[in-house]
């Protein structure tokens, strides 16, 4: 056995890192720099040139529609995040902690993933026959005599976008939380019971804090996906709800690269802030 | 219905897991203010028994009484019985201080903040952890975790503390120290400790009373010397790990075994005929020497040096291992040659005999 000198170890580390670093520079760092660069290009109706200007940025912040889209994005993100947490946590609690048999809990988790066997778009579009004016929900409610005329707000509204996104992304909340809950030593919960704590106390003082890393990972998953969303809002809002993602799509569609880049940069910054914020809550490196 | 003197009582407690009967109609009563060790091999149901007393599991049949009350249907958090887990089960996200204070803070009864502070500090001091209050469990050693677990339980001032193999996770050195400390702490606090263990030395060293559990039944309970000197059945003798046990036939005051025929003064009632002689009462002789009793020819295989004594391992003709414990205070051990034949013998009056002909 030879003893490696620190210098030799260093070159080793560097060689091991090199492929990853090259990959990230080529396909992550360079494109992002490019987007930032293009956002300062000069855009005319039919062409774009690399003369630097702040026009697109001014245009974005000067337009009520664009700034409105930013706030809509933030609002929908917060609502969907809250809903996925409120719906996902109890489900995860059941799957990860209350179900005693490991087999049953695995089966339940697989069931959660079954919707992913169809494509994303199908899952989104499947909400149309559910929520529509003559959709399943309205028909059932009318047949049951609960309502006289169909609820129109169900489809092509912000509500339908929220329902669709929550259903699609809730599983990304359930998974990490269930995983963290499954790792809690059952003895710890029994110890808390033995010390006289009732279920509520045990939940707030033991279970929730110990599952927090799962909540944070789930929240990051959901946030990243919801903030970049355009398909669900496109398909279920009837173009009434415009998110930053939708704006990028339309701008790219009409070859307005500079504006699309501006929105892209704003979205990237927003995501950066959100992810960094979540990572401040728990030290994931230590917890996982 | 009240009881005096006894802290808890089990009445026909039975617990089954599918086909397996973990606890088979256990009746057991424990005196107040004593150290009880519950000795049993793994799978004897000792952990199930503790979990039922603590309230984590319900017995399928039978009742559990605690301080004169039937607590069988009372949930764990209302029982006021302390439980120290084998793996300590500390709350990983809380500091040592908060671990110990947890029960006081989250109990059904509200305890004033000043009192929480004081009782927690006292408990931490009692187990010798002063100064480590702000560490989290990951930052303390195994022995310190054990102390945190103990302080966390004792701060609630329970009348009964259940300890599930509390020393199992500690190294030998620490185990000896904790044995002494556990006893000292118990005496200071006037509580009953029920200590479950698979180690016969631990059970005998720590218990004021030792109860031996086998296959879901308490097969003997008594003081350590009673258990050690007069095991009630071959199983007890076996768990004590201090007896050579032989099969044979007991008939008319004689036991016929692999060592020939030995006179038997008294025998204990048992379904099978068994003959038990303690390791340290078995002696080694050369072939042809004058013997104090029966003669068992065996080959010397190996020896184990334990510091204060030496264990010699012999193999009999029917491939049974027989152990001889020679205490070094009785003189230097003999020089034995490996694979040579020797004769083992003992004073037949010292043997403990079980059999169908035995009395009680």
Image: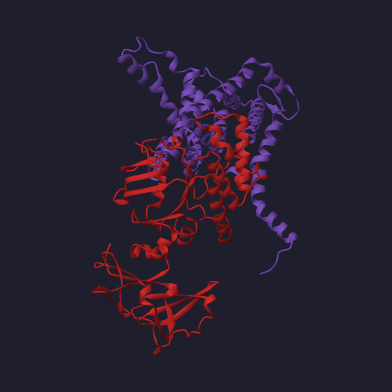
Name the colour assigned to chain A in the rendering: purple
Residue B274 spot, x, y in % from top left? 31, 70
The quadrant of the picture occupied by the N terminus of chain A is: bottom right
Residue B321, position as x, y percentages in the image: 39, 75
Residue furthest top in the image: A148
Q: Quadrant of residue B197?
A: bottom left
Q: Is residue A35 visible?
A: yes
Q: Residue at x 69, y 19 (%)?
A: A61
Of residues B274 and A90, the one nearer the viewer is B274
Q: Position of residue B288 (x, y in %)?
A: 39, 90
The total number of labels drawn is 0
User: Quarter-wise, where is residue B175 in the image?
Assistant: bottom right
Near-viewer residue (A13 or B231):
B231
Front-most of residues B112 and B352: B352
Q: Quadrant of residue A279?
A: top right
Q: Is residue B248 above or below residue A70?
A: below
**Above-or-below relation of A14 to A49:** below
B312 shown above or below B269? below
Q: Quadrant of the C terminus of chain A?
A: top right
Say which colour chain B has: red
The answer to whether one can see residue B213 in this image is no
Which residue corresponds to the image point at 45% horizontal and 45% vertical from the top-left? B32
Percent across and percent down for residue A88 are 47, 31
B213 on left or right of B86: left
Q: Is residue A73 left or right of residue A258?
A: left
Q: Residue at x 45, y 73 (%)?
A: B280
């Amino acid at each position: 056995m030879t003893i490696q000198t620190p210098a030799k170890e260093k070159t080793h580390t560097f060689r091991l890192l090199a492929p990853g670093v090259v990959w990230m520079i080529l396909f992550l760092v360079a494109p992002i720099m490019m987007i930032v660069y293009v956002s300062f290009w000069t855009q005319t109706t039919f062409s774009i040139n690399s003369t630097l200007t702040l026009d697109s940025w001014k245009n974005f912040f000067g337009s009520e529609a664009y700034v409105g889209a930013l706030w809509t994005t933030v609002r929908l993100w917060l609502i969907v995040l809250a809903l996925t947490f409120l719906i996902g946590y109890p489900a995860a609690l059941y799957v990860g902690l209350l179900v005693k048999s490991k087999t049953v809990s695995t089966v339940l988790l697989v069931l959660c993933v079954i919707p992913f066997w169809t494509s994303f778009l199908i899952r989104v579009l499947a909400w149309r026959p559910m929520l529509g004016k003559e959709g399943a929900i309205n028909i059932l409610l009318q047949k049951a005599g609960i309502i006289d005329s169909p609820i129109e707000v169900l489809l092509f509204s912000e509500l339908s976008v929220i329902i669709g996104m929550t259903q699609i992304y809730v599983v990304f909340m359930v998974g990490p939380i269930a995983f963290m809950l499954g790792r809690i030593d059952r003895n710890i919960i029994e110890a808390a019971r033995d010390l006289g704590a009732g279920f509520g106390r045990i939940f707030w003082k033991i279970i929730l804090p110990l599952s927090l890393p799962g909540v944070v990972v789930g929240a990051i998953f959901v946030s990243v996906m919801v903030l970049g969303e355009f398909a669900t809002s496109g398909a279920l809002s009837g173009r009434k709800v415009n998110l930053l993602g939708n704006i990028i799509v339309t701008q790219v569609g009409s070859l307005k690269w500079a504006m699309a880049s501006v929105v892209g940069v704003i979205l990237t910054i927003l995501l950066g802030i959100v992810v960094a914020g979540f990572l401040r809550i728990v030290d994931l490196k230590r917890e996982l | 219905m009240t009881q005096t003197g006894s802290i808890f009582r089990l009445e026909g407690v039975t617990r089954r897991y599918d086909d397996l009967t973990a606890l088979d109609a256990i009746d057991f009563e424990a005196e107040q203010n004593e150290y009880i060790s519950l000795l049993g091999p793994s799978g004897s149901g000792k952990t199930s028994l503790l979990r039922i007393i603590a309230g984590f599991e319900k017995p399928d049949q039978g009742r559990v009484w605690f301080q004169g009350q039937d607590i069988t249907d009372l949930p764990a958090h209302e029982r006021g019985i302390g439980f120290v887990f084998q793996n300590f089960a500390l709350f990983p996200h809380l500091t040592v201080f908060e671990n110990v204070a947890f029960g006081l803070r989250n109990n059904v009864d509200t305890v004033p903040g000043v009192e929480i502070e004081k009782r927690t500090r006292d408990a931490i001091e009692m187990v010798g952890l002063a100064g480590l209050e702000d560490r989290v469990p990951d930052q303390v050693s195994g022995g310190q975790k054990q102390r945190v677990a103990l302080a966390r339980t004792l701060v609630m001032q329970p009348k009964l503390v259940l300890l599930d193999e509390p020393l199992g996770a500690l190294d030998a050195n620490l185990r000896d120290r904790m044995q002494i400390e556990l006893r000292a702490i118990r005496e200071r606090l006037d509580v009953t400790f029920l200590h479950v263990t698979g180690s016969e030395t631990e059970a005998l060293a720590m218990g004021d009373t030792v109860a031996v559990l086998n296959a879901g039944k308490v097969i003997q309970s008594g003081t350590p010397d009673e258990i050690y000197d007069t095991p009630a059945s071959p199983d007890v003798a076996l768990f004590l790990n201090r007896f050579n046990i032989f099969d044979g036939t007991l008939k008319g005051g004689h036991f016929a075994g692999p060592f020939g025929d030995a006179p038997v003064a008294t025998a204990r009632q048992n379904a099978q005929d068994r003959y038990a002689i303690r390791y340290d009462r078995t002696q080694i002789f050369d072939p042809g020497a004058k013997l104090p009793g029966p003669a068992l020819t065996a080959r010397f295989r190996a020896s184990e040096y334990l510091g204060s004594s030496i264990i010699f391992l012999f193999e009999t003709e029917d491939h049974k291992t027989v152990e001889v414990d020679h205490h070094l205070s009785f003189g230097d051990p003999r020089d034995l040659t490996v694979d040579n034949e020797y004769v083992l013998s003992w004073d037949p009056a010292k043997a403990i005999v079980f059999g169908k002909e035995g009395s009680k």
